[in-house]
Amino acid sequence: MENKTQTSADFSTTRCGFVALLGAPNAGKSTITNDFVGAKVSIVTPKEQTTRTTIKGIGIYKNTQIIFLDTPGIFKPKRRLDRAMVANAWTGLGDADISVLVVDAHSGITEQVKAIIDKLKETKPAMILLLNKVDLVKKEKLLELSAALNQAYPFEETFMVSAKSRENLDEFYAYLASHLPESPWYYPEEQMSDMPLKLLAAEIVREKLFMYLQQEVPYELTVEPELWQRREDNSIRAEMTIYVPRESHKQIILGKGGSMIKKIGQSARKEIEEQLEERVHLFLFVKVRENWGEDPARYSEWGLNFNA
């Protein structure tokens, strides 16, 4: 994929626009976004409900700057945070030049996918269908799934890809690039996301918590950057607080003698340094805050509607 080697000055005409990726949790939206950008701007874990707010992933394809809107997975909300995440996903749809429904082809037409299509039928937006994880499905089953989904909703185009193996992704990107409007690029050529670095670092910490903890703790926690300071030696001192609702959760994250939090911190620091290409001193703290999910300030920081 042609990407960061070009600048807008290399082309007589340029294109630019927003592409919203909509879908159920774990459909592969974040993997696609990261692939196009060529770096991790959205965390990816095997667990559902990883993405909590719309992440912008910015990349260049020939003469086109594509800004992917990686939205939270859409599911049946149970808590205030769930409702805010789902509302944020649907908002992303309204902000896009092109909207894409990403469906996990291996899981097929789940209740979540049916609910999304039912919602789409209410406003009838123009949509592209992207069947992901096609490497896990036999061809005849894939064709049946495509036919069933296109019968359920009038998609303008259908693409069959594997984000993991990159199968057919370039064809998808080429289509998007040719269908976005002629426009100057909105962001500098080298920019990959509009997320502040301290929030990207906090997301990486949260990803490591998901990966290391097998219990339900990750769904009940949030990570907040408390300090992001450039030191005299040009390294960064980063202090993050992990808020959990119960003391038992705090003990799980700390681990015996602090062993778990140490592993999580080392893994997160290494990845943050790789992503930022900077030396980082990372300090993690765990605090109990019973009702952090009811704190409007947490929602404001992430651009979520507390009253959704």
Image: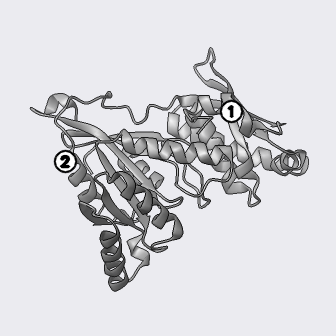
Give coordinates of residue 97: x percent, y percent.
28, 42
Sequence-wise, which precedes: disc 2 or disc 1? 2
Q: Which mark is residue 71?
A: none
User: Is 90 situated left or right of 297 in this image?
Assistant: left
Give coordinates of residue 37: x percent, y percent.
38, 44
Residue occupying the point 42% across, 53% down: 22
Residue 242 visible in image: no
Mark in the foreground, 2 or 1: 2
Q: Which residue is labeled 1 in the image? A: 224
Residue occupying the point 59% across, 51% down: 50
Q: Which residue is labeled 2 in the image? A: 179
Give coordinates of residue 222: x percent, y percent.
70, 40
Residue 217 to residue 145: above or below: above
Looking at the picture, which amino acid does disc 2 mark?
A: His
Residue 138 to residue 4: above or below: below
Looking at the picture, which amino acid does disc 1 mark?
A: Glu
